[in-house]
Image (tube, rainbow, N blue to C red):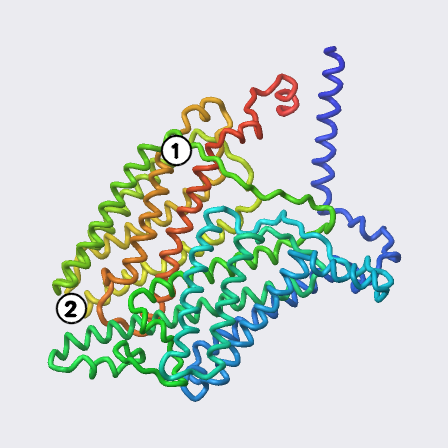
Amino acid sequence: MIMKFKQRVTVTFSESLKSKVSTASTSYSISTDDYISHDNEPQWTRNSTAKSFCINMLCSIYALILTMVAFVIEISPTWRSEDMWLPYSIFCVLMYAVAVSYFIYLYLFVIYPNIINSCIYLLFRKGWLVDPGKWLRDEPVFNGEGAGTMYLRVGTLFFGSMGSVLWGTEVLLCFFENQRHGIYVVKYTLAVVFTYMQMHFIFSNSKISLKRSNIIAKFGLMHCVAVNLWTWLSICLIKSSIKHAKKEIKYAEEEAKNATKTEVFTKWSYDFTMDEFGPHDKQLRAIIKLGSNSELLLTCLVEFSLIAAVICFIIWKNDDPSPGESPTKKKKRSFRFDCSGTSTGIFLGIVVHIISTVVIGMHGILTKSHKTNAADLLVGYTDFLMFLVTLLACVLAFFQMRKLQYRLHAHGEVIDDILLIVGLAGECVYSCTGMDLYLNDRLTKQTVTWITIPAFVLRITEVLVQTVFILFASRMRCYTYLNREKQPGKQVITFLLVCNINLFIYHTFETMGSNFGFPLKLPDNYSVMLSIASPIVVFYRFHSSACLAEIWKHTYSQKHHHEQLIHEPTTENTVVKKL
């Protein structure tokens, strides 16, 4: 027995030594491909891998060019002028029409092919088709990454429905008083249909795995990426113009108390007092009629466009390498949650939620009492307190979860990491802009509160620490018996989850109603930057709560303990490893 074991160890050691020598010598040897005959290999136009690479490359170039053209059209003052209302509207209609046509094709020919297959069988029975096999569509395969978590899909459902409300209101307002040109009705109707169809696709069918040979599906997905990015920029610019107009109005009212309200309003691009519209005005009528509610709808539409663009890109990137061989995953019909060890975290998070809600109410009361400085100062102190609490919670969670085990990156988590980094970038831009404006106010001898810099520094520190924590914690698991029993860090994860949901609500209010950290009159470049970063700030808190919910659900799940068992190394493995 001992002799056999020694022989086995000797063979293992000699094989590992040979592999190391062969690996080290590869850099000095001639490649074996030079001695292999490639005469029988087909040309690249008949190679499926080469054709797939070519299609993906052309799709990427198409999406890049289309996105750049759309961005130039949105930013260019030539295209935004009143004289170009018809060419601009035609461009919008074409963008939405192609995207809607793609989703119609996707639903009829890829996701639900039974209708097309029934028609093919009907034609075959009547003798109009000789070989129906080459025309039949395959059943879809749902084994891709898609939208990832259930929490993210529910958020997509909420944001998409709010965006559909905005476009639907705009369609009805096209017939309000002075009727708009018919192309506006077509444009906003297509926007409603596109938003709704894309929302349904992401929620129900985003895990579909497309074939590499499906050129229409490939180009359609990249067109949807370009449309979502274009919509994101367009709505951000609209939000910028609205916020800039309102701040200019407020600044002008304080500077000129004797001027009438109507005289002040008519100086700016968005006239929030008018009751009539011109037939060719390019501004969104819903913004004026819905008042402050329109800002919430615009924010939801911005976040929906950002999520949809990333999901469409993930689906395009993860095509089906072996169509017909990939297993189909069954959709879950029920969900189980282990709520043990969460009560303390939930109730401490509710305390933070109560404090922030009281601050939101007091801010409205102080603003109506014309005590704007006191209202903004209250928001600043609340920001400092909440970021300090969440930062300490992240550090405590890091310390408690050091006992858990690491596992490989799971399928379907790439989209969570991408969206988290996008949200982090928005938070960094928002905080750095606030600190830069604070320093500029100090240099120009303007009165600024001291809490601004500590609040923004603490904010960006908390965001960085929380992002790193989420990226690490999402790869942790309770594999040992002791960890499964004690569940270290679950209470803190629950507290962070409730805090981020609360901050999602709080930041939505803060970006709409508070001016803490920023002067009343902003330069144009800063106004555009903040309008782009503000929705991403709100989105960061939403997506952080989604990631924390997945950590809370999977890290401490009892059904994963069989994936990896922690054993002491055997004598044989120890000897081989040492050798």
Please determine whether, in this image, residue 294 is positioned above or below residue 147: below
Viewer-nearest residue: 361 or 119: 119
The residue tagged 1 is 490
Mark 2: secondary structure:
loop
Q: Which mark is residue 225?
A: none
Residue drawn at point x = 46 percent, y = 41 percent:
550
Residue at 59% from the left image edge and 71% from the top image edge: 98
Q: Tag 2: residue type?
A: Lys
How far across and down, in percent of the image, does residue 404 sit?
46, 30
Give x and y (percent) for residue 228.
Answer: 50, 65
In the image, farthest residue toward the bottom: 83
Q: Is residue 100 left or right of residue 524?
A: right
Relative to 111, is 447 above or below? below
Residue 247 coordinates in the image, percent (x, y): 24, 72
Which residue was labeled with disc 2?
A: 445
Q: Is residue 4 left or right of residue 97?
A: right
Crowd class of label 2 (few under 14; some 14 to 19; many from 20; radius 10 Å): few
The quadrant in which residue 224 appears is bottom right
Quarter containing the N terminus: top right
